[in-house]
Amino acid sequence: MREITVPAQVVSPRTMNTTDFVLRQAKLASNPALFARRNADNVWVDISAKEFHADVCALAKGMIASGIKVGDRVGIMARTRYEWTLVDFAIWFAGAVSVPIYETSSPSQVAWNLGDSKAVAVVVETSNHENIIRQAAHSEDLTDLANVWQMDHDGLDVLRAAGKDVGDDVLEAARSAAGLADVATIIYTSGTTGRPKGCMLMHHNFVELSENAIAVLGKDVIPPGSQTIMFLPLAHVFARYISVLAVASGAKVGHTPDIKNLLPDLQSFQPSFILAVPRVFEKVYNSAALKAEGEGKGKIFAAAAQVAIDYSRAHQDGKIPPILRAKHFVFDKLVYVKLRAAMGGHVRHAVSGGGPLGERLGHFFQGIGLQILEGYGLTETTAPITVNRPARIKIGTVGAPLPGNAVKIADDGEILVKGVCVMKGYFGRDDLTAESFVDGWFRTGDIGELDEQGFLKITGRKKEIIVTASGKNVAPAMLEDQIRADAIVSQCLVIGDQRPFIAAIVTIDEEALPMWGKQHNLPAGITVAQAALNPVVLAAVQNAVDKANSTVSHAEAIKAFRIVDSDFTETSGHLTPSLKVKRAQVLKDFDTVVDEIYLANKPA
């Protein structure tokens, strides 16, 4: 199959905008809890739709009183927390356009986002964030920036007080000024290459994509009364879209800003569904495997994991052998129930995006009773173009298009898309917008294929396809995903463009190293730099490489690798906030390592 179009199941009124989801929930007699936040005693306390609506209106009035006009751009710079979404909807109620900024951004990155979007105000979380804003404004002469408000201290109370004299009619005029065809937000791409581009997402992107997702996911994944805990950055389109989708469906959202506290937070909040990037699922699996080994139960866990995978594959094929069913029943009582309890005990579905999830990992989680619905999308597509769903799932793919969207495979394998998910274009860059579309189809830059049932499989990134000196085309993601799944590995970057063979740069998982090292009799307190040269670690990584190589041809196989003595992180500049590797930056910073690999393996 080369093209598939799925008609929309819901068509929204053209006068509607994203704020109507809040009004919809606030008008319900049941007054559902849309959010929950911790109180001083660390207990989750619900926030009803009516409470949320009232506070959104109060803040929006404050913005209007402070000079925010319809169509103005307003930045948000904060960690993942309730106030992020509160401010986001307040900006929309004021008729303005929100501009998310990652809270880890440098002053120069902040200056670019605010300056390029011509933002007139920004809401930040802390005084430190405000200092970064002030520094950016001073260095880049951001003359449009008139107001900076803080979430901490009494900054939001100041806004609420400022709007007390703004009438409801004035607020309603601002709130209803935008329709589906108007810009809702400008989200800057995380910039794996070049300057970030401002993607203009419209109200129709959020509204119609949410309505059509609810049409196919609402019954099983996000029915009223369901709940999720948000830990991904809300500045990222994936988390942002799910936040809007939750309000649209009446699901409850909690927030946690620190992923290090994720397991305790999952256990206290008890979500019914979660969303994460593949690296989170890899870490959950690897942590469970290492813990089992540490308790002397490594063989039991390995057997349970294989049964879960086999059970899921058999279930997908439509026939589960009686012996396998019996084994699965036993391991469910011994192992799987504990894994589900560690994630709160109530999680039944997880939505994975932001990168490819390995097929083995997808089957493992499905087999233990946590169905991962892998999807695919970009900032430019408001997150999901395609997604697997409980009633129509094929593990190893990213699903079929959501209603209202279409996917087409170009002659060179590039994935082209159109539909309710696709952005209007790049803010102030008509030239880049024109380059990104062909005959009305958005060019994703990804390589993939559609099977006969319309399921999409991602095989690589067009710009990342490696062409060796002999002319062999290699998609690095296939190898990288398999190597990164090993417990001791944090990141893997496959290299070889215009080189004689394929190689890899590997980093060590610093969090996993102490337990892994103890189990493999490494010296206590071994550092990452020491581990990078340790024969036991080298052998383990070689084993992971060998397993990955067994899935590709000889020409595509990794012939050599180097373990570097530091990890790729967002702080180091090698990862985006959504944990994607910045390939060009890694190759630049580790050019000496790359040269050493090829010099050491140069034919005599």
Image (cartoon, helix red, strand yellow):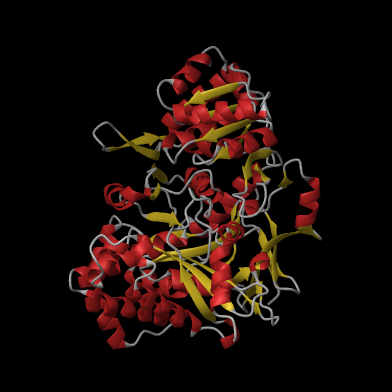
| Closer to us: 280 or 242 | 280
Q: Position of residue 251 (x, y in %)?
A: 43, 46
Left or right relative to 188: residue 261:
left
- Residue 397 appears anywhere in the view: no
Q: Is residue 92 above or below residue 488?
A: above
- Quadrant into which the N terminus falls: bottom right
- Residue 365 appears anywhere in the view: yes
Q: Position of residue 455 (x, y in %)?
A: 59, 72
Left or right relative to 388: residue 538:
left
| Closer to us: 45 or 99 | 99
Q: Position of residue 528 (x, y in %)?
A: 36, 61
Q: Is residue 465 above or below residue 216?
A: below
Q: Is residue 344 above or below residue 170?
A: below
| Outermost front residue | 604
Rendered residue at 36%/76% (across/down): 540
Q: Quadrant of residue 172?
A: top right
